[in-house]
Structure formats: C-alpha cells, structure tokens
Amino acid sequence: EKVKSTYTIGFSQCVGTDLWRKTMLDEMKMELSLHPGVKFLYSDAQNSSARQISQVRVMLRKGIDLLVISPNEAQPLTAVVEEAYNKGIPVIVIDRKTSSTLYTAYVGADNYQLGKMAGEYLGSTLKGDASVLEVMGLPGSSPAIERDRGFYDGIKKFSNIRIAAKVYGDWLKPNTQRQLHKIKTELPGITAVFAHNDVMASGVREVFNSLKLSPGLKIVGVDALPGPGGGLQKVSDKVIDASVLYPTGGKEAIVTAFRILNKEPFSRENILQSLIIDSANVQLMKMQWARVNSQQKDIERQQELIEEQQGIYNSQQVILNITVIT
Ligand code: FRU
C-alpha cells in the first residue's frame, strides 16, 4: 500500500477550554509543526456527548485519514468510534476511553493506578482514624470510573481509613461546590479528600475554608499541571496537599498517529508514567518545568528568526492548516 504525502488528522476533544486540555492541544500543535503539510481538523464538544457524536460524523463526512478522540463519556461515544474504526480509519483513543476494544491505539496514563496511588498516599500519610470525602469526575467517563476503583483498592489495606462521603463533581469546580453544599452537614467530620482532578480539589478547599473547616484537612487532587493556575502551583501554595501527575499525552498521540499513517511499528497501549507531587518534590518539579519552558521559548524564537530570514513569515495556524469544526 502506498503512503500518502499529505494527511488529514481529525481530533475530537470532549471539552477544550480547561488548562489540561489546552496543554494537550499545545503539545499536539508542537508535534504537528514537525510535519509540514498535514491538515488538522479540530472539534470541541464542550462536555456534550451528543455534540461530540455529531462532530465525529462531520469529520467522517469531510474525510479524515486518522481519528484522535477523547470521548466525553464511554458508552455514548462507543458506536460512532466503532463506525470510524470499521470504515478502516485508524482510531487513537486518548485519556478517556470508549466501552469497546475496537480502536487502533490508546494513549494515556493508567487511571486505575492513579487512583490507587492516591489511596496509598493518603493511607501512608494519615495517622489515626480518618474519614475521607471522594469527589469524582463525570459519571460514565472512564477516568472517573477507573480512579474510583483504584482509590478503593488503594485504601483497602488501611483499616483506619473509611470513605465517609462520595459526590460527583463532573470534573468542574461549580458542580463540585454545588454538591458539597448539599451535604454540608456531613463535612465537619471529614479529615481528608481525594478529588479526581485539581480543579475540583481547589473547589473543595474553598468550600472548607468558607465553612471554617480547613485546619488539618488533607486534599489530594490529580493532574499536577505546570504554569499559572496549574496543580504544581496549588501544591506549592498549599491550596492542596498533593496531586497525582496526569500527563496529557498530546505529543505521544501525534507521534503514534504518524507511525500508524506511515505504516511504521507502533504500540497499541501507550501507558504514560505518573507520580505523586507533594511538598517534598514540588519545587524540583517547578524548576524542571521552568527550564523546559524557557528552552521551548528559545526554540520558538529561533523558529521565528529563521522564518523572518526566509521572508516567509506565516502564523503557526497557517503552517499547520487547522480547521475548527463547531
Ligand atoms: C480535563 C480533565 C482533567 C482530568 C481529565 C479526565 O478536562 O477533567 O482534569 O484529569 O479531564 O479525563
């Protein structure tokens, strides 16, 4: 089979506006910029599974050579992803999964393992009897299901810890805070919190602060994003006590996409590594990130200079040929 010279890659994102997913897209763009001529079709389903299904259908109609997708909820997105796969379009599932094994490759951290790490971390840091509040992501989204299971298994061996309350925060701060206000009377007994992401974790801190229940409360989140507004900053500011790193996989997804398109060997399961960030290692992580970020800025500056010299200065958008589907 012949390998095409220009490809169209479709990327269906479940929601595009939060820092984690902006970081994912930036990583993808960086990697895409190494492949001049590629066309990139991007859509943001804004947390709606119905919208995501129709956006994928639009991509299939327009014609794509490969689909990258982070499915909002597993079950509702399964059929359309299987449809793409059965048409012979390679599918890379990133971060969230469908309920099916019909996909070409998966990129993301092991969410069960992440939940387990959070549980074991709380188990080894909490002394004496502890009542834990678990704030889960969107029901039906695979990381929420897997983090919940992993967390349960992680704390299982610590007999001093029990899960006293569980709410769904849907990955969002306002929803988390609404749910916590509903169970306000149960909050005074809570000594620790596992929130499925840092956005919800910091929402929990605000509620406990406003109820004057914060002293002694340990909060663990997930994501540990670098930069302003990210989890690393929240850990170092002690808004949260720890965060489990959840790499976005944006770069790895595009690398895998080109391996598949160019008929090169690739792995079907690309499991990204994670670790716990707390006060013991957060400064190191921040320093590392600052270094990488400044090198990145240097590369971008060099790129601009080269383009100026060649007199072909174009915005990255034009070079990358991105089309946004609404
Ligand atoms: C971002 C996010 C992350 C979380 C991931 C789970 O949209 O909510 O905070 O780790 O999605 O899919």
Image (cartoon, rainbow, N blue to C red):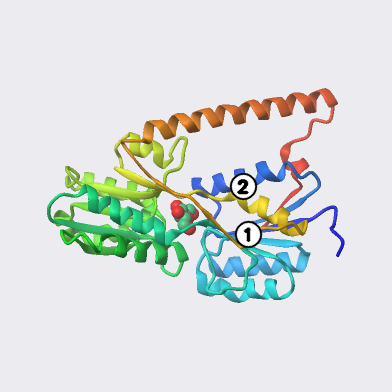
Residue 207 point in image, percent of width and height? 26, 49
Q: Is residue 326 visible?
A: no
| Residue drawn at (77%, 59%) of the image | 263
Q: Which mark is residue 251?
A: 2
Residue 140 point in image, percent of width and height? 44, 70
Q: Amino acid at mark 1?
A: Ser
* Rendered position, 283 above or below 271: above
Residue occupied by mark 1: 267
Residue 188 point in image, percent of width and height? 14, 54
Q: Earlier in the sequence, mark 2 or mark 1?
A: 2
* Rendered position, 135 above or below 79: above
Give how far apart the Cα atoms at labels 2 and 1 are: 15 Å
Q: Is residue 11 visible?
A: yes
Residue 43 point in image, percent of width and height? 64, 57
Residue 9 location, quadrant: bottom right
Quadrant in which the N terminus appears: bottom right
* Rendered position, 287 above or below 265: above
Q: Which mark is residue 297?
A: none
Q: Please, which residue is most extreme toward the front here?
A: 265
Residue 241 location, quadrant: top left
Q: Are marks 2 and 1 in contact (CB under 8 Å)?
A: no
